[in-house]
Image (tube, rainbow, N blue to C red):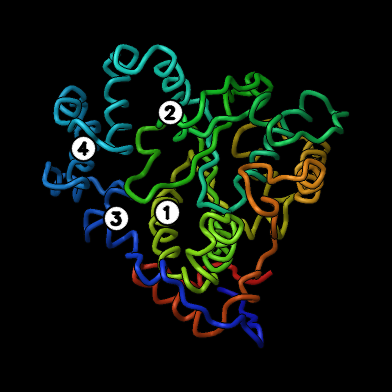
Amino acid sequence: MARWLMASKAAPRAASRAARKVRSVAEEHLPPHLGPALLTRDWDTLAAHAGTTSKDARLAAALTGLRAGADAEVLAAQPEEPGEALRYLGDVARWRLGTLAAARGAEFADAFGRLHRADVVTVATIQKSGTHWMRFFLTNYARALADPDVSRPISYPQLLQDFYGNNRWQVFREAEPYRTPTTLLAAHGVSDVTMQHFRHDLDPFVFSPGRKIMLYRNPLDYVVSLYHYTIKQRPQHRDDAAHPRDVIERMLDVYALHYLTLDSYRDDPDVHVASYESLKEDPGLRFREVVRFLGLPLVDDAVDRALALSDISVVRAMEEQTGRSMVVKLDGYFTRDGSIGQWKQFFDDADVERARRVLAGHGIDLDAFTVDG
């Protein structure tokens, strides 16, 4: 059950021109019945709605076609401008047919195949849920296994260039290059440690083998953290909203769509689901669970060393040393506030009830989350 501690004084209310104009992602992109099925692999519903009358019907047709092995038919049905999700499904078909190199180039085809290997581990997350913390830990654990005396922290650019830098979907959409991973964990059955956020339009892992670590955060802190990351810390977007409460509905609609996919994997033996709050409350225990899940040798000293090298204070010190955010250009630092319950500085009872209603509209109970540290 959730643990509530309401702040006695919330920040003043503010209106946002953009927030008033924005339709929820759920309403704009995903019609009733078919939308959740695309996210949770409800094959009966997908088959019933497959067709060419809408983007979602085309996605349903491609998914069910690929599942049935009708790869050539899936390709033949693709429109000239398929969009990101449908293009990816077309690339899955080309990859399985052996024609991806001819269509997209040998380098892309090689990267696509490597990122769909069964020995790839993917950190799959709802945004602002500890993605980079987990990536730093796994990288530093690999380093500590190879060198028990390792003591030098690595920067985020070093993680990307020298260790495990692949963001799967960014490679698939050719927004980022494929980075050859380190071989530190190859002897332990892990060829790469990649990352990817969930999507609002389909389950991006439906045809991806390999073990996955899926992370989520309580929805109230998610809104606060994402507001700062995407709006307040970016001058070009600062006029989009004046306060986190201005974007509660919009952001929680997106959160709910991502959470539906994550929740559908809880019983999958190749998936480890963890909340950001559980990682924060007992890092030693929870990260050891991750090590066991991945089948890596469990070396207690290596876990402790990796946790120390991956601590937010260490990463923040490196950001301050360089004077810039480690991931993207921001006003301030990426490591802004990793605490549980920061929402209490921004939301009052009425805001929490709004959040509860939005989530309930997607079948999600706010009381199922840990919202206070």
Position in image of residue 138 (x %, y %)? 67, 36
Q: Residues within 10 Å of mark 3 (few under 14, many from 20)?
A: many
Q: Secondary structure at mark 1?
A: helix
Q: Tag 4: residue type?
A: Thr
Marker disc for residue 36:
3
Q: Which residue, given by chain and number where applicable, does mark 4 sit on?
A: 64
Give how far apart the Cα atoms at labels 4 and 3 are.
15 Å
Closest to the camera, between mark 2 and mark 4, is 2
Kindly give the residue lying farthest to the bottom in the view shown: 8
The image quadrant that residue 192 belongs to is: top right
Residue for point 19% across, 26% down: 75
Labels 4 and 1: the sequence-earlier one? 4
At label 2, the amino acid type is Glu
The residue wearing badge 1 is 258
From the viewer's perspective, tell me whether residue 221 is left or right of residue 47.
right
- Which of the two discs, 2 and 4, labels the residue nearer the N terminus? 4
Q: Disc 3 on helix, strand or loop?
A: helix
Residue 24 x, y percent position in the rendering: 34, 64
Instruction: Decide which of tag 3 and tag 1 comes sooner along the chain.
Output: 3
Q: CA distance from mark 3 to mark 1?
A: 10 Å
Picture coordinates of residue 341, whole percent (x, y): 65, 70
Residue 64 drawn at (x, y percent)? 21, 37
The residues tagged by marks 4 and 1 sit, at their Cα atoms, a distance apart of 21 Å
What residue sits 62% from the left and 20% below the top? Answer: 186
- Calculate the distance from the C-alpha at mark 2 to the C-alpha at mark 3: 27 Å
Question: Which residue is under mark 2?
Answer: 174
